[in-house]
């Protein structure tokens, strides 16, 4: 064997050993060494691209699959992987363009039709995606991957009965690891249909390392399952850590159950709640008898890790959503009370400033910082807000975090509406002050992001414009988490929903 070939083989063996050990970051570097030693062998590029895709390094994966396709242009696997890499970079038209020639050449391949449909779903076009996904299922009626992809489209359209049927059928044709990826969205469809016991049970799959985008919680404490069949006093006197999960909005929403956990622990128990650091002041005030700490999050080897700050001396631990399985078995189990307490002095401060503005003071928010893929269906384009912004007798207050200068200018230049920018507050980072501002307003109006969850949890009057896919409605026409919140459904389209919100404002309903 010549020296370059020997170096390539040695580097490949080392890379594969590292991959088997789960040291994926190191494995990718070793594969790159083998690739360089081989003189950038195009056949090897596909193997490296597969690992880069697994690690979420989509731009690198894209380049590697393009290299592999120059050597093997007929490789359907590399074409599918290339489309996946492009899709994850939100380059949807390019992903479709990468798949189209393969579909034309191999119309009998269900994976290609499924991949096309998945691109359209993530682009926010699930209705159009169904034609492709139906064809994929027709070609392979029992195919787990095809059924799962179609279920996601149904879910995105808010047709949860059809989504649930496809998710359940998909499980029969999938490996155990792939089943975990299906069980989480399937659980959300169950919750959306009002099956809370089944939904919370299925939602436990999010803790599996095989689920999509897994989070590994680091704590030496023993896990506590919050099994509804355990005796009511099973937690009495124990020491428990609750670790917040998901994004900011979910951390706020899931905290609905903290008072129940505190009661279950009893006066001799100890509860520590670990949340995103920006939430610590608000949560510490709201739950003065518990310890509230921040958490740290980082990624390595394709996994996301989260750990609570402070001492790791708890007897038991659970992710923050886990107690819902025991204490929220039906929408009627949600209490009729707010559970977060804003800073009273800051509420007074904001009320004084707002009193200088005419009319009803309405805070608005219209987007998330993550506006790609399926999130696109959760928010309307700002241009469709005209019926709201032109409602008479209203002073609008900006609650939208992130860069929104373009939308503020658009409202003024095109509608003559000046949305007031509250001074001295960072709407992204000063979450304790954001909560106080929401409670000082006459109304908070917008879509489901962190801010409207804060308003709801603090008991502020709020209107939520909810997509038909919104599982937190839990089979109702409202948000049980926040009893005072009014839901305006977008099931008949964003434009109609915003027109309804504008008519309600114009009728004085914000007072």
Image (tube, rainbow, N blue to C red):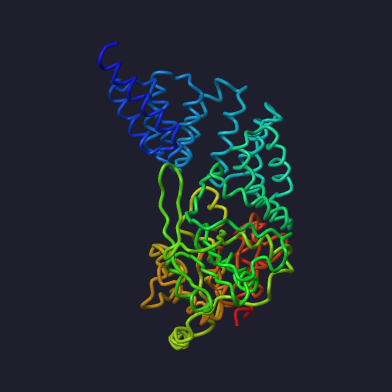
Residue that sits furthest to the left in the current view: 3
245 horizontally vs 234: left or right:
left
Q: How many numbered marks are there? A: 0
Q: Residue 61's spot in the image, x, y percent?
A: 40, 34
Q: Which quadrant is home to the N terminus?
A: top left
Task: Name which residue lies at 25% across and 15% down.
Answer: 3
* 41 lies above or below 470: above
Residue that sits furthest to the top in the current view: 1
100 horizontally vs 41: left or right:
right
Residue 143 quadrant? top right
291 horizontally vs 173: left or right:
left
The one nearer the camera, 121 or 335, is 335
* 332 lies above or below 200: below
Q: Residue 403's spot in the image, x, y percent?
A: 39, 62
Residue 210 in view of the camera = yes
Residue 333 quadrant? bottom right
The one nearer the camera, 367 or 312, is 312
* 439 lies above or below 63: below
Q: Residue 7's spot in the image, x, y percent?
A: 28, 20
Task: Name which residue lies at 43% across and 40% down.
Answer: 55
Residue 356 quadrant? bottom left
Q: Which quadrant is home to the C terminus?
A: bottom right
Residue 132 in view of the camera = no
């Amino acid at each position: 064997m010549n020296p370059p070939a020997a170096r390539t083989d040695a580097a490949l063996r080392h890379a594969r050993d590292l991959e088997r050990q789960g040291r994926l970051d190191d494995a990718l570097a070793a594969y790159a060494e083998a690739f360089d030693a081989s003189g950038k062998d195009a056949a090897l590029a596909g193997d490296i691209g597969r690992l880069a895709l697994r690690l979420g390094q989509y731009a690198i994966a894209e380049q590697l699959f393009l290299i592999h396709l120059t050597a093997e242009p007929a490789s359907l696997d590399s074409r599918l992987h290339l489309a996946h890499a492009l899709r994850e970079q939100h380059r949807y038209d390019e992903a479709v363009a990468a798949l189209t020639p393969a579909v034309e050449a191999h119309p009998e391949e269900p994976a290609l039709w499924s991949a096309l449909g998945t691109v359209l779903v993530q682009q926010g076009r699930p209705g159009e995606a169904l034609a492709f996904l139906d064809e994929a299922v027709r070609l392979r009626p029992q195919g787990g991957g095809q059924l799962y992809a179609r279920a996601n489209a149904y879910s995105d359209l808010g047709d949860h009965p059809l989504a649930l049927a496809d998710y359940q059928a998909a499980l029969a044709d999938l490996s155990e690891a792939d089943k975990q990826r299906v069980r989480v969205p399937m659980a959300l469809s169950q919750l959306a249909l009002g099956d809370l016991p089944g939904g919370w049970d299925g939602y436990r799959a999010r803790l599996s390392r095989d689920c999509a985008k897994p989070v590994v919680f680091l704590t030496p404490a023993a896990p506590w399952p919050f099994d509804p069949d355990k005796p009511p006093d099973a937690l009495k006197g124990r020491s428990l850590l609750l670790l917040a999960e998901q994004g900011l909005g979910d951390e706020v929403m899931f905290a609905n159950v903290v008072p129940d956990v505190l009661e279950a622990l009893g006066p001799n128990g100890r509860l520590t709640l670990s949340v995103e650091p920006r939430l610590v002041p608000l949560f510490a005030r709201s739950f003065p008898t518990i310890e509230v700490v921040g958490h740290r999050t980082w990624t390595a080897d394709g996994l996301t890790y989260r750990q609570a700050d402070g001492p790791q001396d708890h007897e038991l631990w659970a992710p923050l959503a886990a107690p819902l399985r025991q204490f929220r078995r039906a929408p009627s189990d949600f209490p009729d009370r707010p559970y977060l307490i804003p800073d009273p002095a800051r509420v007074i401060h904001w009320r004084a400033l707002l009193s200088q503005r005419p009319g009803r003071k309405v805070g608005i928010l219209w987007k998330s910082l993550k506006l790609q893929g399926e999130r696109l269906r959760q928010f309307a384009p700002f241009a469709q807000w005209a019926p709201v912004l032109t409602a008479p007798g209203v002073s609008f207050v900006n609650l939208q975090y992130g860069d929104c200068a373009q939308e503020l200018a658009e409202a003024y230049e095109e509608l003559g509406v000046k949305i007031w920018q509250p001074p001295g507050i960072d709407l992204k980072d000063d979450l304790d002050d954001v909560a106080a501002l929401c409670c000082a307003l006459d109304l908070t109006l917008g879509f489901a992001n962190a801010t409207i969850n804060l308003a709801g949890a603090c008991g502020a009057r709020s209107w939520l414009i909810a997509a038909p896919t919104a599982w937190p409605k839990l089979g109702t026409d409202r948000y049980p988490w926040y009893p005072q919140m009014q839901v305006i459904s977008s099931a008949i389209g964003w434009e109609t929903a915003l027109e309804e919100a504008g008519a309600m404002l114009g009728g004085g309903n914000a007072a």
